[in-house]
Image: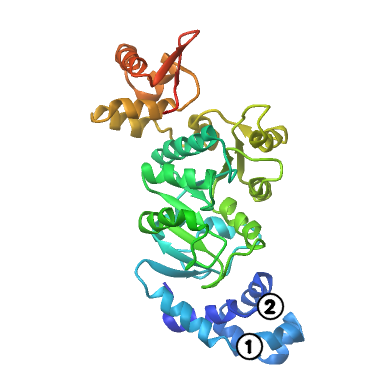
Protein backbone atom coordinates (compact mmCIF):
# COMPACT_ATOMS: atom_id res chain seq x y z
CA UNK A 1 0.00 0.00 0.00
CA UNK A 2 1.23 3.51 -0.75
CA UNK A 3 2.83 5.63 1.98
CA UNK A 4 1.18 8.54 3.74
CA UNK A 5 2.86 11.31 1.74
CA UNK A 6 1.94 9.72 -1.58
CA UNK A 7 -1.62 9.08 -0.38
CA UNK A 8 -1.96 12.76 0.49
CA UNK A 9 -1.11 13.66 -3.10
CA UNK A 10 -3.71 11.24 -4.45
CA UNK A 11 -6.31 12.67 -2.09
CA UNK A 12 -5.37 16.24 -2.98
CA UNK A 13 -6.00 15.42 -6.64
CA UNK A 14 -9.33 13.69 -6.10
CA UNK A 15 -10.77 16.10 -3.51
CA UNK A 16 -10.79 19.19 -5.73
CA UNK A 17 -14.38 20.12 -6.66
CA UNK A 18 -14.63 20.53 -10.41
CA UNK A 19 -11.75 18.17 -11.25
CA UNK A 20 -13.62 15.00 -12.19
CA UNK A 21 -12.49 11.51 -13.00
CA UNK A 22 -11.92 12.17 -16.68
CA UNK A 23 -9.55 15.08 -15.96
CA UNK A 24 -7.83 13.11 -13.20
CA UNK A 25 -7.13 10.21 -15.56
CA UNK A 26 -5.91 12.61 -18.24
CA UNK A 27 -3.42 14.12 -15.80
CA UNK A 28 -2.24 10.74 -14.54
CA UNK A 29 -1.80 9.45 -18.09
CA UNK A 30 0.37 12.47 -18.90
CA UNK A 31 2.43 12.72 -15.71
CA UNK A 32 2.26 9.29 -14.06
CA UNK A 33 1.66 10.12 -10.40
CA UNK A 34 -0.10 12.94 -8.55
CA UNK A 35 3.22 14.24 -7.18
CA UNK A 36 4.39 14.83 -10.75
CA UNK A 37 1.08 16.53 -11.60
CA UNK A 38 1.50 19.10 -8.83
CA UNK A 39 5.18 19.60 -9.68
CA UNK A 40 4.38 20.57 -13.26
CA UNK A 41 4.36 24.16 -14.43
CA UNK A 42 1.14 26.12 -14.73
CA UNK A 43 1.69 26.59 -18.46
CA UNK A 44 2.19 22.87 -19.04
CA UNK A 45 -0.99 22.09 -17.16
CA UNK A 46 -2.91 24.78 -19.03
CA UNK A 47 -1.92 23.23 -22.33
CA UNK A 48 -3.26 19.88 -21.17
CA UNK A 49 -6.47 20.67 -19.25
CA UNK A 50 -7.14 24.36 -19.87
CA UNK A 51 -6.83 27.49 -17.74
CA UNK A 52 -9.95 27.01 -15.61
CA UNK A 53 -9.10 23.45 -14.56
CA UNK A 54 -5.51 24.47 -13.92
CA UNK A 55 -6.64 27.23 -11.56
CA UNK A 56 -8.83 24.75 -9.70
CA UNK A 57 -6.01 22.23 -9.53
CA UNK A 58 -3.32 24.55 -8.22
CA UNK A 59 -5.26 27.15 -6.26
CA UNK A 60 -7.86 25.08 -4.38
CA UNK A 61 -7.05 24.51 -0.75
CA UNK A 62 -8.34 21.14 0.46
CA UNK A 63 -5.85 20.35 3.22
CA UNK A 64 -8.58 19.78 5.81
CA UNK A 65 -10.40 17.24 3.63
CA UNK A 66 -7.13 15.46 2.84
CA UNK A 67 -6.20 15.28 6.53
CA UNK A 68 -9.65 13.96 7.42
CA UNK A 69 -9.44 11.19 4.82
CA UNK A 70 -5.91 10.23 5.91
CA UNK A 71 -7.08 10.03 9.51
CA UNK A 72 -10.01 7.82 8.48
CA UNK A 73 -7.66 5.43 6.65
CA UNK A 74 -5.76 4.76 9.89
CA UNK A 75 -8.83 3.13 11.45
CA UNK A 76 -9.07 -0.63 11.81
CA UNK A 77 -9.88 -2.38 8.49
CA UNK A 78 -10.21 1.01 6.77
CA UNK A 79 -8.25 1.60 3.59
CA UNK A 80 -7.88 4.03 0.71
CA UNK A 81 -6.84 2.19 -2.44
CA UNK A 82 -5.54 4.10 -5.47
CA UNK A 83 -5.06 3.14 -9.11
CA UNK A 84 -1.37 2.57 -8.33
CA UNK A 85 -2.11 0.14 -5.51
CA UNK A 86 -1.79 -3.63 -6.23
CA UNK A 87 -4.96 -4.18 -4.17
CA UNK A 88 -7.02 -2.04 -6.57
CA UNK A 89 -9.80 -4.20 -8.13
CA UNK A 90 -8.40 -5.31 -11.47
CA UNK A 91 -11.91 -5.79 -12.87
CA UNK A 92 -12.55 -2.06 -12.50
CA UNK A 93 -9.52 -1.31 -14.68
CA UNK A 94 -11.47 -2.89 -17.56
CA UNK A 95 -14.28 -0.32 -17.46
CA UNK A 96 -14.02 3.04 -19.29
CA UNK A 97 -14.12 5.21 -16.17
CA UNK A 98 -12.54 3.52 -13.14
CA UNK A 99 -12.43 5.67 -10.00
CA UNK A 100 -9.03 7.18 -9.26
CA UNK A 101 -9.26 5.86 -5.72
CA UNK A 102 -11.74 3.99 -3.57
CA UNK A 103 -12.50 3.98 0.13
CA UNK A 104 -12.72 0.46 1.53
CA UNK A 105 -13.94 -0.93 4.83
CA UNK A 106 -13.38 -4.63 5.52
CA UNK A 107 -11.54 -7.42 3.76
CA UNK A 108 -9.16 -6.27 1.03
CA UNK A 109 -8.77 -9.78 -0.41
CA UNK A 110 -12.34 -9.69 -1.71
CA UNK A 111 -11.52 -6.82 -4.08
CA UNK A 112 -9.85 -9.15 -6.55
CA UNK A 113 -11.95 -12.28 -6.12
CA UNK A 114 -14.36 -13.34 -8.87
CA UNK A 115 -17.73 -11.74 -8.18
CA UNK A 116 -21.32 -11.86 -9.37
CA UNK A 117 -23.64 -8.89 -8.86
CA UNK A 118 -27.23 -9.47 -7.75
CA UNK A 119 -29.58 -6.49 -8.02
CA UNK A 120 -33.28 -5.77 -8.21
CA UNK A 121 -36.30 -3.98 -6.87
CA UNK A 122 -36.32 -2.04 -3.63
CA UNK A 123 -39.90 -3.27 -3.16
CA UNK A 124 -39.72 -6.94 -4.13
CA UNK A 125 -42.35 -9.58 -3.70
CA UNK A 126 -41.72 -12.01 -0.81
CA UNK A 127 -40.77 -14.67 -3.37
CA UNK A 128 -38.39 -12.27 -5.11
CA UNK A 129 -36.55 -11.47 -1.89
CA UNK A 130 -36.35 -15.17 -1.09
CA UNK A 131 -35.02 -15.93 -4.58
CA UNK A 132 -32.31 -13.29 -4.18
CA UNK A 133 -31.25 -14.69 -0.82
CA UNK A 134 -31.23 -18.30 -2.03
CA UNK A 135 -29.37 -17.54 -5.25
CA UNK A 136 -26.79 -15.49 -3.34
CA UNK A 137 -26.28 -18.30 -0.85
CA UNK A 138 -25.85 -20.95 -3.56
CA UNK A 139 -23.52 -18.82 -5.68
CA UNK A 140 -21.51 -17.83 -2.64
CA UNK A 141 -21.15 -21.50 -1.73
CA UNK A 142 -19.80 -22.05 -5.23
CA UNK A 143 -16.98 -19.59 -4.51
CA UNK A 144 -18.28 -16.38 -6.05
CA UNK A 145 -18.29 -13.12 -4.12
CA UNK A 146 -21.75 -11.53 -4.15
CA UNK A 147 -21.74 -7.83 -5.06
CA UNK A 148 -24.69 -5.50 -4.61
CA UNK A 149 -25.60 -1.96 -3.61
CA UNK A 150 -26.85 -2.21 0.01
CA UNK A 151 -30.26 -0.88 -1.02
CA UNK A 152 -33.50 -2.09 0.50
CA UNK A 153 -35.15 -5.11 -1.06
CA UNK A 154 -33.26 -7.38 -3.43
CA UNK A 155 -29.84 -5.87 -2.67
CA UNK A 156 -30.21 -6.45 1.05
CA UNK A 157 -31.53 -9.98 0.48
CA UNK A 158 -28.52 -10.79 -1.71
CA UNK A 159 -26.09 -9.55 0.93
CA UNK A 160 -27.89 -11.56 3.61
CA UNK A 161 -27.79 -14.69 1.50
CA UNK A 162 -24.03 -14.38 1.08
CA UNK A 163 -23.50 -13.64 4.77
CA UNK A 164 -25.58 -16.69 5.69
CA UNK A 165 -23.25 -18.79 3.55
CA UNK A 166 -19.57 -17.84 3.14
CA UNK A 167 -19.86 -14.21 4.18
CA UNK A 168 -18.09 -13.08 0.98
CA UNK A 169 -20.02 -10.03 -0.15
CA UNK A 170 -19.17 -6.59 -1.54
CA UNK A 171 -21.42 -3.59 -0.93
CA UNK A 172 -20.81 -0.70 -3.32
CA UNK A 173 -22.44 2.41 -1.95
CA UNK A 174 -23.46 5.82 -3.27
CA UNK A 175 -22.50 7.94 -0.24
CA UNK A 176 -19.31 8.59 1.68
CA UNK A 177 -18.11 5.41 3.34
CA UNK A 178 -18.70 6.98 6.74
CA UNK A 179 -22.43 7.20 6.01
CA UNK A 180 -24.97 4.37 6.18
CA UNK A 181 -27.87 4.59 3.77
CA UNK A 182 -30.60 3.58 4.04
CA UNK A 183 -30.74 3.74 7.83
CA UNK A 184 -32.86 0.57 7.96
CA UNK A 185 -29.84 -1.37 6.69
CA UNK A 186 -27.57 -0.18 9.47
CA UNK A 187 -27.12 -3.58 11.12
CA UNK A 188 -26.58 -5.20 7.73
CA UNK A 189 -23.95 -2.60 6.81
CA UNK A 190 -22.12 -3.17 10.08
CA UNK A 191 -22.08 -6.92 9.47
CA UNK A 192 -20.81 -6.48 5.92
CA UNK A 193 -18.06 -4.17 7.19
CA UNK A 194 -17.04 -6.82 9.74
CA UNK A 195 -17.29 -9.92 7.53
CA UNK A 196 -17.27 -8.66 3.95
CA UNK A 197 -16.27 -5.42 2.23
CA UNK A 198 -17.85 -1.99 1.70
CA UNK A 199 -16.59 0.22 -1.14
CA UNK A 200 -17.23 3.86 -2.04
CA UNK A 201 -15.61 6.16 -4.57
CA UNK A 202 -17.17 9.21 -2.91
CA UNK A 203 -15.25 11.39 -0.44
CA UNK A 204 -15.70 11.06 3.30
CA UNK A 205 -18.87 12.82 4.38
CA UNK A 206 -20.62 12.69 0.98
CA UNK A 207 -24.37 12.81 1.76
CA UNK A 208 -27.20 11.04 -0.03
CA UNK A 209 -27.68 12.37 -3.57
CA UNK A 210 -29.84 10.73 -6.22
CA UNK A 211 -27.24 11.58 -8.88
CA UNK A 212 -24.63 9.38 -7.19
CA UNK A 213 -26.51 6.10 -7.38
CA UNK A 214 -26.51 5.63 -11.18
CA UNK A 215 -22.80 6.46 -11.04
CA UNK A 216 -22.34 3.85 -8.30
CA UNK A 217 -24.13 1.27 -10.47
CA UNK A 218 -21.28 1.14 -13.00
CA UNK A 219 -19.02 -0.14 -10.20
CA UNK A 220 -21.50 -2.84 -9.17
CA UNK A 221 -21.50 -4.22 -12.71
CA UNK A 222 -17.84 -3.43 -13.36
CA UNK A 223 -16.44 -5.33 -10.41
CA UNK A 224 -18.39 -8.49 -11.31
CA UNK A 225 -18.28 -11.12 -14.03
CA UNK A 226 -22.00 -10.73 -14.54
CA UNK A 227 -25.18 -9.19 -13.18
CA UNK A 228 -28.24 -11.18 -12.08
CA UNK A 229 -31.47 -9.16 -11.99
CA UNK A 230 -33.98 -10.84 -9.70
CA UNK A 231 -36.98 -8.51 -9.88
CA UNK A 232 -37.23 -5.09 -11.53
CA UNK A 233 -40.00 -2.78 -12.64
CA UNK A 234 -39.72 -1.12 -16.04
CA UNK A 235 -38.21 2.07 -14.58
CA UNK A 236 -35.93 0.31 -12.11
CA UNK A 237 -32.37 1.46 -11.52
CA UNK A 238 -31.44 -2.21 -11.82
CA UNK A 239 -32.02 -1.93 -15.55
CA UNK A 240 -29.36 0.80 -15.61
CA UNK A 241 -26.96 -1.60 -13.92
CA UNK A 242 -27.85 -4.32 -16.44
CA UNK A 243 -27.32 -1.92 -19.36
CA UNK A 244 -23.95 -0.87 -17.98
CA UNK A 245 -23.01 -4.53 -17.55
CA UNK A 246 -23.70 -5.16 -21.22
CA UNK A 247 -21.65 -2.12 -22.23
CA UNK A 248 -18.80 -3.33 -20.03
CA UNK A 249 -18.82 -6.79 -21.60
CA UNK A 250 -20.30 -8.51 -18.54
CA UNK A 251 -22.92 -11.25 -18.64
CA UNK A 252 -26.51 -10.27 -17.89
CA UNK A 253 -28.91 -12.74 -16.26
CA UNK A 254 -32.58 -12.35 -15.35
CA UNK A 255 -35.07 -14.45 -13.43
CA UNK A 256 -38.49 -14.59 -15.10
CA UNK A 257 -41.68 -14.10 -13.12
CA UNK A 258 -45.41 -13.80 -13.47
CA UNK A 259 -46.68 -11.93 -16.51
CA UNK A 260 -49.09 -10.18 -14.14
CA UNK A 261 -46.41 -8.85 -11.79
CA UNK A 262 -45.06 -5.31 -12.38
CA UNK A 263 -41.90 -6.42 -10.59
CA UNK A 264 -41.20 -8.97 -13.32
CA UNK A 265 -41.58 -6.72 -16.34
CA UNK A 266 -38.06 -5.35 -16.17
CA UNK A 267 -36.63 -8.88 -16.13
CA UNK A 268 -38.84 -9.90 -19.06
CA UNK A 269 -37.64 -6.85 -20.98
CA UNK A 270 -34.01 -7.84 -20.35
CA UNK A 271 -34.68 -11.41 -21.50
CA UNK A 272 -36.25 -10.11 -24.71
CA UNK A 273 -33.12 -8.01 -25.23
CA UNK A 274 -30.83 -11.02 -24.87
CA UNK A 275 -30.25 -11.49 -21.14
CA UNK A 276 -29.84 -15.11 -20.09
CA UNK A 277 -33.00 -16.54 -18.55
CA UNK A 278 -32.08 -18.40 -15.37
CA UNK A 279 -34.15 -20.64 -13.14
CA UNK A 280 -31.44 -22.02 -10.85
CA UNK A 281 -28.03 -20.99 -9.59
CA UNK A 282 -26.65 -23.80 -11.72
CA UNK A 283 -27.76 -21.91 -14.84
CA UNK A 284 -25.58 -18.97 -13.84
CA UNK A 285 -22.59 -21.14 -12.98
CA UNK A 286 -22.76 -23.02 -16.27
CA UNK A 287 -22.98 -19.79 -18.28
CA UNK A 288 -19.93 -18.45 -16.42
CA UNK A 289 -18.20 -21.84 -16.82
CA UNK A 290 -17.71 -21.80 -13.08
CA UNK A 291 -17.46 -24.79 -10.76
CA UNK A 292 -20.87 -25.93 -9.55
CA UNK A 293 -22.00 -25.63 -5.93
CA UNK A 294 -22.43 -29.40 -5.75
CA UNK A 295 -18.93 -30.18 -4.49
CA UNK A 296 -19.01 -27.75 -1.59
CA UNK A 297 -22.54 -28.60 -0.65
CA UNK A 298 -22.10 -32.37 -0.87
CA UNK A 299 -19.28 -32.08 1.63
CA UNK A 300 -21.63 -30.18 3.95
CA UNK A 301 -24.34 -32.81 3.61
CA UNK A 302 -21.99 -35.71 4.13
CA UNK A 303 -20.50 -34.02 7.17
CA UNK A 304 -23.88 -34.42 8.84
CA UNK A 305 -25.65 -31.67 10.76
CA UNK A 306 -28.69 -29.85 9.40
CA UNK A 307 -29.15 -32.16 6.41
CA UNK A 308 -32.80 -31.19 5.64
CA UNK A 309 -31.93 -27.49 5.56
CA UNK A 310 -28.99 -28.13 3.26
CA UNK A 311 -31.14 -30.21 0.94
CA UNK A 312 -33.70 -27.38 0.80
CA UNK A 313 -30.94 -24.95 -0.06
CA UNK A 314 -29.89 -27.24 -2.92
CA UNK A 315 -33.48 -27.44 -4.14
CA UNK A 316 -34.17 -23.73 -4.24
CA UNK A 317 -37.81 -22.92 -4.92
CA UNK A 318 -38.19 -24.15 -8.48
CA UNK A 319 -39.63 -27.61 -9.17
CA UNK A 320 -36.96 -30.25 -9.65
CA UNK A 321 -36.77 -33.99 -10.16
CA UNK A 322 -35.08 -36.69 -8.13
CA UNK A 323 -32.29 -37.15 -10.69
CA UNK A 324 -31.59 -33.43 -10.66
CA UNK A 325 -31.36 -33.40 -6.86
CA UNK A 326 -29.11 -36.46 -6.91
CA UNK A 327 -26.75 -34.69 -9.29
CA UNK A 328 -26.66 -31.53 -7.15
CA UNK A 329 -26.18 -33.32 -3.84
CA UNK A 330 -24.15 -36.37 -4.78
CA UNK A 331 -26.55 -38.52 -2.75
CA UNK A 332 -28.32 -41.66 -3.88
CA UNK A 333 -31.96 -41.75 -4.95
CA UNK A 334 -32.94 -43.96 -1.98
CA UNK A 335 -31.47 -41.55 0.59
CA UNK A 336 -33.04 -38.59 -1.13
CA UNK A 337 -36.46 -40.26 -1.26
CA UNK A 338 -36.44 -40.76 2.50
CA UNK A 339 -35.35 -37.16 3.12
CA UNK A 340 -37.98 -35.78 0.78
CA UNK A 341 -40.71 -37.87 2.39
CA UNK A 342 -39.77 -36.52 5.82
CA UNK A 343 -39.70 -32.96 4.47
CA UNK A 344 -43.12 -33.49 2.89
CA UNK A 345 -44.51 -34.79 6.19
CA UNK A 346 -43.09 -31.67 7.86
CA UNK A 347 -44.91 -29.48 5.35
CA UNK A 348 -41.72 -28.12 3.83
CA UNK A 349 -41.87 -29.86 0.44
CA UNK A 350 -44.73 -30.78 -1.87
CA UNK A 351 -44.77 -33.53 -4.50
CA UNK A 352 -45.86 -32.37 -7.95
CA UNK A 353 -47.15 -34.36 -10.93
CA UNK A 354 -44.43 -36.08 -12.89
CA UNK A 355 -42.37 -37.02 -9.85
CA UNK A 356 -41.07 -33.50 -9.25
CA UNK A 357 -40.65 -31.74 -5.93
CA UNK A 358 -40.95 -28.13 -4.83
CA UNK A 359 -40.00 -26.41 -1.62
CA UNK A 360 -42.79 -24.55 0.14
CA UNK A 361 -42.04 -21.03 1.45
CA UNK A 362 -41.88 -20.81 5.21
CA UNK A 363 -45.03 -19.51 6.85
Residue at the (70%, 86%) spot, across then down: 54
**149 in relation to 52, above or below:** above
Q: Look at the image and tell me in which quarter the N terminus lies.
A: bottom left
Residue holding disc 1: 60
Mark 1, Cα crowd under 10 Å, few <14 / some 14-19 / many 20+, is: few
Q: Closest to the observer: 153 or 114?
A: 153
* Residue 140 image position (x, y, % from top left): 42, 41
Viewer-closest of 58 and 343: 343
Q: Residues within 10 Å of mark 2 (few under 14, many from 20)?
A: few
Q: CA distance from mark 2 to mark 1?
A: 10 Å
180 and 1: which is toward the camera: 180
The residue at the point 45 percent across, 65 percent down is 104
Q: Are marks 2 and 1 in contact (CB under 8 Å)?
A: yes
Q: Which mark is residue 216?
A: none
Which residue is the site of mark 2? 18
The residue lying furthest to the left in this view is 304
Could you say whether the residue bearing mark 1 is in a helix, strand or loop? loop
| Residue sticking out furthest to the top | 354
Amino acid sequence: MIDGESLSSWLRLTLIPGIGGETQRKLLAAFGLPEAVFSSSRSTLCDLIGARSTRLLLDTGNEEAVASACAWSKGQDQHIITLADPDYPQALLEIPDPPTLIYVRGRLELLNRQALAIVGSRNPTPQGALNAERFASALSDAGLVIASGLALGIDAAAHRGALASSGDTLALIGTGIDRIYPARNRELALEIGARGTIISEFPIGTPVSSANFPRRNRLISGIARGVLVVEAAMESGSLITARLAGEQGREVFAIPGSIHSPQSRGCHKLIKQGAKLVETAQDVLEELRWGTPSTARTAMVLDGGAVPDQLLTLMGFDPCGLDELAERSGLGADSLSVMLLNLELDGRVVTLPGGRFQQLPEA
